[in-house]
Image (cartoon, rainbow, N blue to C red):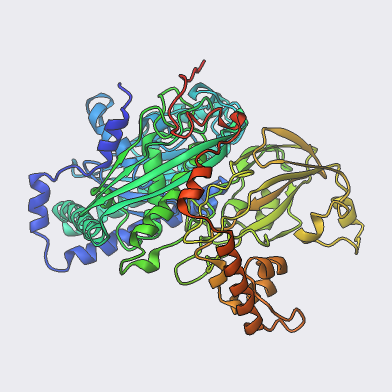
């Protein structure tokens, strides 16, 4: 069967026109049917989501990086419960592929279970698997239900499903196009054996999560059938189409209320995985807004590269959904129809529209640029409207993913991405308030942080500290939310393997808004042959288990290393400090000199920001003993700083003349493309 093109996938994201049967069913809905029926779908999905999370084995699934959804018979997303919004828009592509190419052979029947994870066919990246089940009522296909989540292991050249050294898709492990893995409501044992035989490092996790997906999708299917049995199949068909119609109407009305024009933001990354450090323009976004229509143009984004830091077009769109459904579409249904007024342009050959042979297992890392630039560009657009309170600086969007693998203290093979640091990033500063501290996972706004004790019980590690990372926020009139820091120590196993997937050790992708500051970059710190465990066993009273004390190299003995947070697979022995696990903070909103002095001092007391930041960035004067603000001195300090800014200022022409002549060093531009346009300089060769 043909692999769908980028154009096909973008077309399949759009809603299929209604059939005559659907329109007649809509017309037969009584007053109140839509409102009650909509809530019924919410209840169905909430129940299935709870079943899903309680059934998962992978850390990401347990933490909430999951989604369940209901689709029309034609495959359009009607409503979903999340978890993560990342899978919302992409699943219709997979269903429509099945309908287009598999309706006759192998056929679509009641009781089928379909799965897919291949980004070429509509997925995000290999670890994100989707399970789909058709909903038949007395032989008629009336809907589909689906469940998706991140299961870390794929059998790639490195553990954890996101190999940073993969030069092409052939090194990324198991790529599954849409395929039938179950019949008559039962998973096929021969296909389950495939996961065990393929070379998956943690087959019990992969198979358990597959069963969890299938169970969640089937629970939603059962409830939809109960609704059809009670109200009739025409009610279900009409309700689902009506929900699409209302969602599109709401999206168009909202977009039409925003000002016409062009709104831009550019985001950068500092690495492309195993290829090493280098500057990449991960998203060059221009939003063209006219009437009730948006065109998102990514011209100027850097060319594709021979690493896994590439993303296919639907994955890029999925990352936009993360921002839209969290903020400006937060009160609209999670529906294909809300994207009906939105079109996209991804230049062929860029990192967001690469060759089919490209590795894309780290697509989520390159797409952090989309989430960061979307927050800024959309906030610029809506700031002057009645929705100005939805304007927000970029959340952390760091996604510093950390993978442990090996044999656990229970003698079981494992390879899992640990969710705590990912799920405690800071929210961006908001129009009326600071961002929330340790608020969420960039890809999963409803994700939760697992208990440290559960992590220690499941994996051969000890977590001596888990706390806010002071000054990890981007400063501003409304600072970004603070992130967290943990320490991971190898424990109860002679050796564990560790790798990270990241891109913000030299350049932060997250962009501030309206004069705010970006959050800090993230170092990669580990300590081999550390004496931390022994000192804890000895009850050393001089040992202070907090980050500021432990980061002092005199506080913990051993061989310290500080490198980029992105690190290839390497072993650590029991007692080694595997890493300081950082979750970054959100970007700042507005000028720090406009921050409420009392809020600043409150943040100092809470150890969210440092005394140095309060005095040197926010220019707040206070008594360190009583923590009382001196308003008069604060105003004087701020007035002086504003005058100093004016003295440092230059005209636009003068600034542009010097700025336009600057250029990064050539070694940093190996994968950027031409400077400054970002056009491809040579074809990418993939063995």
Q: Is residue 507 left or right of residue 178?
A: right
**Between 87 and 132, which is closer to the camera in this rendering?**
87
Looking at this view, name the residue that lies furthest to the top: 687
| 54 up-or-down from 357: above or below | below
Q: Is residue 563 left or right of residue 313?
A: right
Q: Please give the name of the residue rendered at 9% of the width and 51% of the height, measured from the top-left corner.
A: 23
**Between 286 and 175, which is closer to the camera in this rendering?**
286
Q: Is residue 475 left or right of residue 30?
A: right
Residue 658 at what x, y percent from top left? 53, 43
Q: Please give the name of the residue rendered at 34% of the width and 45% of the height, measured from the top-left corner.
A: 89
**Between 456 and 242, which is closer to the camera in this rendering?**
242
Can residue 459 be seen here? Answer: no
Q: Is residue 452 left or right of residue 333?
A: right
Residue 366 at what x, y percent from top left? 49, 39
| 199 up-or-down from 346: above or below | above
Quarter of image, res 190 = top left
Q: Please give the name of the residue rendered at 71% of the width and 66% of the height, measured from the top-left corner.
A: 612
Residue 312 at what x, y percent from top left? 40, 33
Q: Quadrant of the N terminus?
A: top left
Residue 267 at what x, y percent from top left? 48, 45
Can residue 349 be seen here? Answer: yes
Report how many numbered discs are placed on residues in the image.
Answer: 0
């Amino acid at each position: 069967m043909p692999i769908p093109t980028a154009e096909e996938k973008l077309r399949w994201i759009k809603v299929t026109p209604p059939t005559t049967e659907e329109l007649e069913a809509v017309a037969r809905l009584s007053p109140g049917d839509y409102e009650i029926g909509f809530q019924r779908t919410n209840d169905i999905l909430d129940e299935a989501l709870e079943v899903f999370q309680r059934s998962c084995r992978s850390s990401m699934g347990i933490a909430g990086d999951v989604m369940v959804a209901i689709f029309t018979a034609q495959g359009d997303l009607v409503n979903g419960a999340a978890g993560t919004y990342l899978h919302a828009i992409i699943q219709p592509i997979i269903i429509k592929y099945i309908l287009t190419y598999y309706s006759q052979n192998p056929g679509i029947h009641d009781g089928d279970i379909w799965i897919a994870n291949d980004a070429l066919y509509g997925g995000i990246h290999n670890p994100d698997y989707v399970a789909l089940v058709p909903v038949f009522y007395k032989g008629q296909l009336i809907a589909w239900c689906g469940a998706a989540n991140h299961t870390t292991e794929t059998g790639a050249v490195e553990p954890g499903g996101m190999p940073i050294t993969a030069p092409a898709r052939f090194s990324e492990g198991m790529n599954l196009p849409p395929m039938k893995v179950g019949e008559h409501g039962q998973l096929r044992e021969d296909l389950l054996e495939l996961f065990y035989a393929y070379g998956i490092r943690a087959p019990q996790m992969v198979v358990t999560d597959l069963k969890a997906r299938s169970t969640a999708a089937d629970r939603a299917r059962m409830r939809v059938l109960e609704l059809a049995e009670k109200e009739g199949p025409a009610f279900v068909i009409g309700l689902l189409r009506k929900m699409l119609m209302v969602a599109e109407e709401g999206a168009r009305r909202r977009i039409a209320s925003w000002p016409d024009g062009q709104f831009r933001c550019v985001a950068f990354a500092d690495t492309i995985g195993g290829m090493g450090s280098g500057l990449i323009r991960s998203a060059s976004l221009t939003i063209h807004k006219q009437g009730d229509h948006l065109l998102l143009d990514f011209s100027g984004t850097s060319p594709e590269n021979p690493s896994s830091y590439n993303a296919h077009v639907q994955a890029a769109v999925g990352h936009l959904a993360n921002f839209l459904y969290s903020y400006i579409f937060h009160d609209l249904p999670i529906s294909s129809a809300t994207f009906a007024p939105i079109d996209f342009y991804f230049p062929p050959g860029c990192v967001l529209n690469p060759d089919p042979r490209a590795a894309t297992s780290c697509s989520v890392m390159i797409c952090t640029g989309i989430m960061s630039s979307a927050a800024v560009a959309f906030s610029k657009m809506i700031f002057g409207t009645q929705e100005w309170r939805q304007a927000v600086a970029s959340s952390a969007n760091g996604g510093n993913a950390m993978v442990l693998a090996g044999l656990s203290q229970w003698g079981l093979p494992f390879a899992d991405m640990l969710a705590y640091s990912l799920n405690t990033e800071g929210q961006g500063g908001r129009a009326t308030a600071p961002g929330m501290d340790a608020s969420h996972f960039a890809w999963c706004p409803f994700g939760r942080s697992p208990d440290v004790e559960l992590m220690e019980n499941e994996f051969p590690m000890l977590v001596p500290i888990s706390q806010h990372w002071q000054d990890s926020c981007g400063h501003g009139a409304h600072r970004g939310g603070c992130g967290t820091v943990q320490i991971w120590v190898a424990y109860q196993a002679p050796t564990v393997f560790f790798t990270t997937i990241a891109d913000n050790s030299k350049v932060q992708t997250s962009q501030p808004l309206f004069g705010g500051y970006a959050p800090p970059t993230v170092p990669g710190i580990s300590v081999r042959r550390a004496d931390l465990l022994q000192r804890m066993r000895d009850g050393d009273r001089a040992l202070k288990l907090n980050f500021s004390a432990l980061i002092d190299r005199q506080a913990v003995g051993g061989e310290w290393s500080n490198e980029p947070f992105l690190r290839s697979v390497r072993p650590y022995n029991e007692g080694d400090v595997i890493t300081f696990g950082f979750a970054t903070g959100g970007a700042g909103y507005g000028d720090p000199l406009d921050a409420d002095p009392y809020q600043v001092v409150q943040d100092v007391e809470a150890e969210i920001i440092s005394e140095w930041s309060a005095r040197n960035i926010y220019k707040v004067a206070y008594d360190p003993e009583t923590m009382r603000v001196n308003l008069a001195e604060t105003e004087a300090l701020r007035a002086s700083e504003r005058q100093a800014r004016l003295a440092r200022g230059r005209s636009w022409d003068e600034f542009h003349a010097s700025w336009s002549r600057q250029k990064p060093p050539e070694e940093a531009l190996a994968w950027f493309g031409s400077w400054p346009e970002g056009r491809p300089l040579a074809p990418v060769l993939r063995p």
